[in-house]
Amino acid sequence: LNASLTLDPALRVAPVHRRTFGSFVEHMGRCVYTGIYEPDHPTADADGFRGDVLELVRELGVTTVRYPGGNFVSGYRWEDGVGPRAARPVRRDLAWHSTETNQFGLDEFVRWARRAGIEPMTAVNLGTRGIQEALDLLEYANHPGGTSLSDQRVANGAVEPHGIRMWCLGNEMDGPWQIGHKTAREYGRLAAETARAMRMAQPDLELVVCGSSGSSMPTFGAWEAEVLEQAYDAVDYVSLHAYYEEHDGDLRSFLASAVDMDHFVDSVTATADAVGARLRDRKRIMLSFDEWNVWYLSRFQAEEPREDWPVAPRVIEDRYHLADAVVVGGLLISLLRHSDRVTSASQAQLVNVIAPIMTEPGGPAWRQTVFHPFAQTARAARGQVLRVEPVSPAHETARFGDVAVVDAVATHDAETGEAAVFVVNRSVDEPVALDVDARPLGVDRVVECLTLADADHRAVNTARDPDRVAPRPGKDVRLDGGRLGVVLPPVSWTVVRMA
Ligand code: AHR
């Protein structure tokens, strides 16, 4: 197969937003405990943070981390997680049917995030709680001092305010599984009033209102419209969540998951803009895609409900294969392509729970296959996102009809002159010879070409064989007179950096 595209620095979409490369740490399964925090681990520092995980987090290039949930936040009392550890209460976590020891809380999270070089982002509980508790948390976290709650933070060892800018107003409040689930009318009103009160305390916050927990929710669209009608003036972002999996061995449709993500983003953008038009408000609501990934959700849903209340059990520790990583690479292409509206995103989650990084308690940490497209994209995407229109053969998919075999996006940094093109080949059995007209960029050498592919689409990385799937130098790559040629193996993700 053959495909082609042109890279033109004049066709700018928007700047690459660093927050596109965000992630998510929830008190769920082993994401926190034996994930980022394990005081007895040989690599743990004085705060109990795993050093091997911190190193991988830095390598992953994560920029922002959303915390502490997720479904967990809708039953969470943030006060339980601060102050002397011995006095912190042990509670039941109803969302994941487990026991929460509260040995890790907000202050530890912010300290960990600073150590990882990450911007912390948080969420208030609008499931079992409301405006007052949100204000208390904000005072504790961000007020410099001299008030009851900010002085408590100082007494707990965090002298400087945490300075958290981005706050989620609850989590997936449209989902019947959510503790304190609400109708759009109920939630929209609560979110709007919480946002207004929080802004009275700190006007420069960036506030995220809950959109739908997925585009297949029966209330999708109507939910966003109703919630934004009420909260438009008070918030900056609406959230989107999407998880993808292969259904019934339909690899072609699965590889085209980004088609669904594109449609989802376009639909929410249109809905938000329609509300803005109706309200005669010229402000643009941005999109925070604050949960996205591959997740074999149907396997999880088929499991027997848990009856015990374990501490940090193994929950949704999906093992990702090569094809999953190609899908993740494709989803990153979709997010970047929408950088004019998607200005923040969080892959869910960071460690152990549907995660790019896996650990064993007391043992090693390693990179799952999906680690690689994320790390390489976070590293190479710089400057401006360029609009790219591949000329590609199409193939039929059961879920999305005719879909282009090749999908791509590119970035260009005018300061350094470097450009990067990110591309997936969604054919399950045929290589594609890609021709890129890069003459408008004035580039003359390939800095790096990396491809993620494997003869076995189901190959995984394990503790014993952690580098079975990893990016390798791309095949038959040449740049001649501004024209780049590269061969894309079937089921592959590739990045080419040029200067
Ligand atoms: O990321 C796992 C769960 O997925 C989150 O807790 C929830 O928000 C979503 O349904």
Image (cartoon, rainbow, N blue to C red):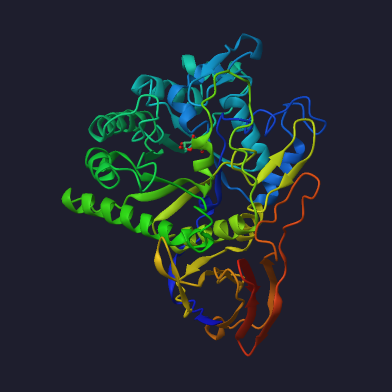
How many badges with numbers are in the image?
Answer: 0
Q: Can residue 400 be seen from the camera position used here?
A: yes
Left or right relative to 323: residue 252: left
**Percent position (x, y) of residue 132?**
36, 19
Residue at point 50%, 36% (across, down): 302
Q: Nearer the viewer, residue 317 or 203?
A: 317
**Percent position (x, y) of residue 346?**
51, 46
Quarter placement of the N terminus: bottom right
Left or right relative to 376: residue 348: left
**Percent position (x, y) of residue 413?**
56, 69
Tell me which corner region of the image, top left, top right, bottom left or bottom right, holds residue 364.
top right
Q: Nearer the viewer, residue 415 or 325?
A: 325
Residue at point 62%, 67% (across, down): 492
Left or right relative to 464: residue 487: left
Q: Nearer the viewer, residue 250 or 214?
A: 250
Q: Is residue 73 above or below residue 436?
A: above
